Amino acid sequence: MNISESRIKGVFVVEPRVFEDERGYFFESFRHNQLKEAGINIEFVQDNVSKSYHGTIRGLHYQIENPQDKFITCLKGEILDVAVDIRKGSPTFGNYVAYKLSEENHRSLLVPKGFAHGFSVLSEEAIISYKCSDYYHKPGERGIRWDDPTIRVNWGVSKPIISEKDKKLPLFPSIKEQDTF
């Protein structure tokens, strides 16, 4: 397993060793001891799965109460996975990283607490699995609008499909200080 830190401190790309033959492939998608050896010691307590269709954008979401580290893997299709740094005092505050995760590259993204997370679906459909280090807690749920002009994420889709809830999220400059990390 190759674990490398992105240009924003704390976000890691995890690339497993994939064994392929005429039957298909096999790989270890998550291995706690290898993450721990890389200095990442997170206990995950909840697994989520979502299915979305081409052009869907989900995010940018985070929890201020019961914040979550997330380990995201695309099981089917291809997504653009995005992590926005919302840690007060961070030199990369307001910046984002984006990686393509797919069933082809088997890559995962580790997004720590202190980041807003979202993804867009680049393929016909996508199935995403993500591990969380804390339980979903609706009262602590927060977000940033997907089309924020300050952050300027290039989602890679021409006709985005956005939930009504995500359309109403605040712009980044209007987020209250207590709603950042």
Image (cartoon, rainbow, N blue to C red):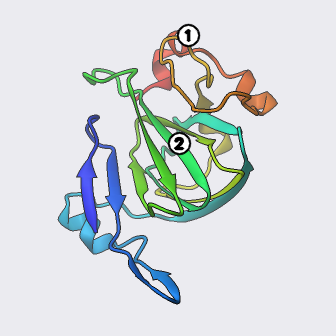
Which of these two is toward me, 23 or 113?
A: 23
Q: Disc 2 designates what residue?
A: 80
Q: Label 1 crowding class (10 Å Cα cut-off): few <14, some 14-19, many 20+?
A: few
Check the image and report above or below for 153 versus 81: above
Q: Position of residue 65 (x, y in %)?
A: 53, 39
Q: Residue furthest right?
A: 164
- Residue at screen point 27% across, 24% down: 90
Question: What amino acid type is highlighted by mark number 1?
Answer: Ser
Mark 2, secondary structure of its residue: strand
**Residues at circles 2 and 1 in contact by the CB criterion of under 8 Å:** no
Question: x, y (%) of residue 11?
Answer: 33, 44
* Comparing labels 2 and 1, the label whose residue is closer to the camera: 2
Q: Secondary structure at mark 1?
A: helix
The residue at the point 68 percent across, 56 percent down is: 50
Nearer to me, 105 or 168: 105
Q: CA distance from mark 2 to mark 1?
A: 25 Å
| Residue type for callout 2 | Leu
Q: Look at mark 1 in the image and give the residue it sits on.
A: 174
Is 74 above or below relative to 153? below
